Amino acid sequence: MNVDDVKALATRIREEVAKAITGQHDTVDLMLTALFAGGHILLEGPPGTAKTMTARCFAQALGIAYGRIQFTPDLMPGDIVGSNIYNFQTGQFTLTRGPIFCDLLLADEINRTPPKTQAALLEAMQEHAVTFDGTTHSLGRNFMVVATQNPIEHQGVYPLPEAQLDRFLFKHRVSYPGPEEERAIIVHHGGGSASHDIAQYGIKAQTNRETLQEALEVVGSVTLVDDVVGYIAALVRATRENADLEVGAS
């Protein structure tokens, strides 16, 4: 596999997601960028902008293990990472893995759960591993989180602090579709079919865990020339020195 193969793979993934999602091209592009860069993405937008649906279709097109956590005020860290449960028949503890053990995790409405539970997820995002009862369990090199939050809710929410937002490579504001896209959505689903049933769209997996790992290695092997490295460093430094920015890039 070479760089051209990776570009072709990205194009096929876009095409598969587009079978179910009308518009949101910039959202899918940023999700692909986060994937190949080994990062995570936070999608912020009002209800009805297909944040959850886009993540589900994205995972389907990738052909990798998908998990979802609906964050609520009573969610506990153990509900995310799992726990060791004592087996009275064997006299031993049995590991029960939580939904975080997957390749792509949708963290839906992440700002609806308390900071302690948020921290359990954000630590796993940073380390690509979870630790409980003194044992560390790897989540794999390709582990990716797509988190969503609703910016218009102000009651019963726990906003992510800046330090935790830094765990995400991107924070993307998802907007409503344009007039023509909304017309297309109405026509597409005007027959009464349930839009959330992604099986009806025939999205086919374009890769798997092994092929995806190979693609990530190809992306990681790309060499940056010194001029590009210097330009990137200058941009980052400029964000820290600009008086209009409260917090610069890290």
Image (cartoon, rainbow, N blue to C red):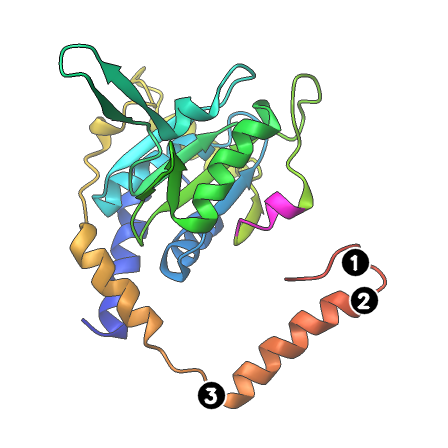
The reply to whether the C-beta atoms of the residues labelled 1 and 3 are less than 8 Å apart is no
The residue wearing badge 2 is: 242
Count neighbours of disc 3 (C-alpha within 10 A) and say few if under 14, some if 14 to 19, many if 20 or more. few
Locate the N terminus and report the quarter of the image it occupies.
Answer: bottom left
Amino acid type of the residue that numbered disc 1 sits on in the rendered structure: Leu
Q: Position of residue 234 (x, y in %)?
A: 67, 78
Where does the magenta region start and end?
163-168
Per the image, label 3 sits on a secondary structure element best described as loop
Residue farthest along the bottom direction in this orientation: 226
Per the image, label 1 sits on a secondary structure element best described as loop
Q: Counting residues from the N terminus, which is met first, the one under dot 1 or under dot 3?
A: 3
The reply to whether the C-beta atoms of the residues labelled 1 and 2 are less than 8 Å apart is yes
The residue wearing badge 1 is: 245
Q: Nearer the viewer, residue 8 or 118?
A: 118
Q: Nearer the viewer, residue 44 or 64?
A: 64
What is the number of the mark on residue 225? 3
Residue farthest along the left direction in this orientation: 90
Q: Position of residue 215 (x, y in %)?
A: 25, 64
Quadrant position of residue 79:
top left
Residue drawn where x is 31% and y is 52% of the image: 142
Amino acid type of the residue that numbered disc 2 sits on in the rendered structure: Asn
Residue drawn where x is 56% and y is 46% of the image: 172
Q: Position of residue 43 (x, y in %)?
A: 53, 40
Q: Position of residue 112 (x, y in %)?
A: 58, 23
